[in-house]
Image (spheres, rainbow, N blue to C red):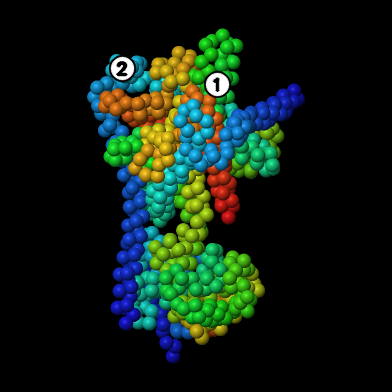
Amino acid sequence: MAGKKSRQEKDAFTLKEKVFRGLLYSAAIVILLLLLGFLITLPLNSLPSIKEYGFGFVFGKVWKPTKGELGALPFIIGTLYTSFFALLLSIPFSLSIALFLGEYFREGAVPAFLKSSVELLAGMPSIIYGFWGIFVLVPIVQKIQLSLGIAPYGVGIFTSSIILTIMILPYSASIGREVIQLVPDDLKEAAYSLGATRFEVIRKVILPYARSGIFAGIILSLGRALGETMAVTMLIGNQNKIPKGIFSPGNTMASLIANDFAETTEELYLSAIIEIGLILFLLTMIINLIGRIIIRKTSVT
Amino acid sequence: MGNTRFRIAANKIFQGIVVFLSFIIIVPLFLIILHIVINGISAINWDFLVSLPAPVGEEGGGIANAIVGTFIIILISSIMAVPVGVLTGIFLYEYRTSKLAEVVRICVEVLMGVPSIVLGIVGYLWIVLTFGSFSALSGGVALAIMMLPVIIRSTEETLGLIPDTLREASLALGVPYYRTIIKVIVPAGFSGIMTGILLSVARIAGETAPLLFTSFGNPFMNLNIFKPTETLPHMIYIYATSPYKEWHTAAWGASFILVVFLFALNFITKILARR
Amino acid sequence: MNKTILKTEKLSAFFGKEKVLKDIDISFPEKKVTAIMGPSGCGKTTLIRCINRMHELIAGATITGKVYLKEENISDLNPILVRRKIGMVFQRPNPFPTMSIYENVIAGYKLNGLRLPKDDLNIIVEDSLKKSALWDEVKDILHRKGSFLSGGQQQRLCIARALAMKPEVILLDEPTSALDPKATSRIEELIVELKDTVTILIVTHNTAQAARVSDFTAFMYLGELIEFGDTQKMFIAPDNTKTEEYLTGKFG
């Protein structure tokens, strides 16, 4: 009878259905376990260093592995210095591109060209930026330094910040463009009908409306800047000291790890480097979290 | 009246500034492409592509091992990341309102933001130490973790765009849920999912940091995934930061190859996205 | 006397705690067209979705009461099998965009992994498309994608797709509300022809349509069954005042 057959078929279906859903859940669990793995592995392997140097590690100014004195401050400062400098420098450019493509010239060959160019820049690998930076940017910076009467290192905070600026601005530019495009036309028209100029509409209607999205793009850029490794490593001068000024060489957390990790098997030293990786990881996570909160608070929709 | 003229002037000036600042970005882009093409093309010949690196100081040699190594590692990471990523994306679509989905989404966002060098550390700790050697496998694992968030996000987004009526039509024909997903929904979203996969490959193809202490590098050709392997980005790094002029030239050549590969990938992705 | 093919017994449906169908008792006669009409929100779509067990797919949706298909309680059957016996056509035509016309008609078989010899499939395709009055228009372009057809043609394709499964009952959920008048009248003609093959339940908010195509009509209001009976009789001399008010356009 139909009833009996349906029970057999029912079981077959249910089994396949269960297997399928099981696979879906398994994939989701893998992601959870992955993140969990990070959160366990990094602190676990930093333990020797944490035990040895304690909380002061974060504020320690000296990094001399041969003497056993290890402090993370030079690199934390190096990371923050380069990242924030690049961020601030990139904002006028990325905001301009966002306004150009999202408000002024949305259609046409020239905007399409600009959009493609920005995409190309976003897709360029870090190593190529670094490589190009060594052979093109460094000589330029050296000339600038000579004309200013300072030591022509060529490499240093300044150079790596410049390359970072170029690397991160496509991100805030793209996101900025998207949110600026989404500002409803009727809001803008209301302002125009009151006699506002375009500049005023941008300042008073578009930017306030789009501000949380623009901010999201900025946070994304900052996150990229903090974690950027190769280009910075090649252009920062690799000096494990707190940089004195903008043209000094220095080092970031990422570039320290890149340089030193494979150089040693000594447990304590390695563990300290891993601890720096942990600090970098936490820093990026916290900034992303803060960004999310601010975005939620400032969002119009 | 004076105020109006000022406002109109300010408007024009602002527009000018916006246009100017927007196009400055073209300068570095142009210079980068220019240098890669000029310096790179001179290094490229058939020999360059198929031979192994020559010892320092000797003429000739090539980047064959790096090209092969790059493909091997991309293959390894894709094999790991694509199934897990697409399934997770389907999970997030199926169970989108559940608490677990919320948690997974947060995990995906965090993973997306992990600096690539930290992924290298993890790859080292989990795979290199376990197997006792630098390997293509460990590099693949680190890169797979980089690919996952991109694939997951684009799969979830693509599936979300598929109209409900399609699902309903299939279910109304008596097709069980799992078959509806596999045979109707996922195929309908195929090009979007494929785009996500290609984007994730483009993301990792040029990555160096995670490979520094996972796949490490190898002056010879290596097809064993448990042994160190050379890759294009890594080779560029080693050669560019070396003091040898021949190596610099080779690095430009390798950069050229890498950039052409990424261009091609992007181009294919765009065509696919248009479907 | 008309034989009953589908019967609901004290059927109530809920979205969470909200009761949207209240103790519906209807016996649908076999091989006849029954219209289910009423103003928006009266529960007519929910009713048919309970019949093919699509209602329960919504999170938090539940039912109480029973539905019988030919003496069998559909809750005892696997919902997948219920849906093969009771087909559905939706308000907006929804042919599968990645499939050809041919593949769309036999989609129910393909997607269920039911393998049939090519000849059998060809016969099913031709038969279903003829029954849905689409064969002549598409017989030479069976391998083109379904999305190229007009709205009315797409809807007839969806009807063919449902017919291909050889169901006992077909549920039509406002099948012509997204179509132009010409396409609408073609489908109405089709419905009257089809009842010899299969029992039809048609949900409609268009009373004139109900009068044109149906043998029996159920009038629903705010989740309750107000009146059920012979269409001609109900339209000329309804038993219930609410029915009369609805038919004369006083509300809805």
| Other-residue count near label 1 (Cα within 10 Å), few / some / many at <14 / 14–19 / ≥20 | many
Q: Nearer the viewer, residue A103 or A15?
A: A15
Q: Which residue occupies the extreme bottom position in the image?
A: C1
Q: Is residue B253 visible?
A: yes
Identify the image quadrant of the N terminus of chain A: bottom left
Q: Quadrant of residue A288?
A: top left
* Residue A41, percent from left and from top: 29, 36
Label 1 SS: helix
First in sequence: mark 2 vs mark 1: 2
Q: Which mark is residue A66?
A: 2
Picture layout, residue C78 above or below residue B209 = below
* Residue B154, percent from left and from top: 48, 48
Is residue B265 found left or right of C5 in the rendered image? right
Q: Which residue is mark 1?
A: A138
Task: Name the residue located 31 percent from the left edge and 44 percent from the top edge.
Answer: A33
Total number of numbered discs in the rendering: 2
Q: Nearer the viewer, residue B221 or A136?
A: B221
* Residue C251, percent from left and from top: 55, 68
Label 2, label 1: how many angstroms apart (C-alpha)? 30 Å
Q: Is residue C192 visible?
A: no
Q: Nearer the viewer, residue C66 or A194?
A: C66
**Amino acid type assigned to the residue bearing label 1 in the image:** Val
Tell which subunit mark 2 falls on. Answer: A
Report whether mark 2 lies on the same chain as mark 1: yes
Label 2 SS: helix
Task: Name the residue located 44 percent from the left edge and 90 percent from the top edge.
Answer: C1
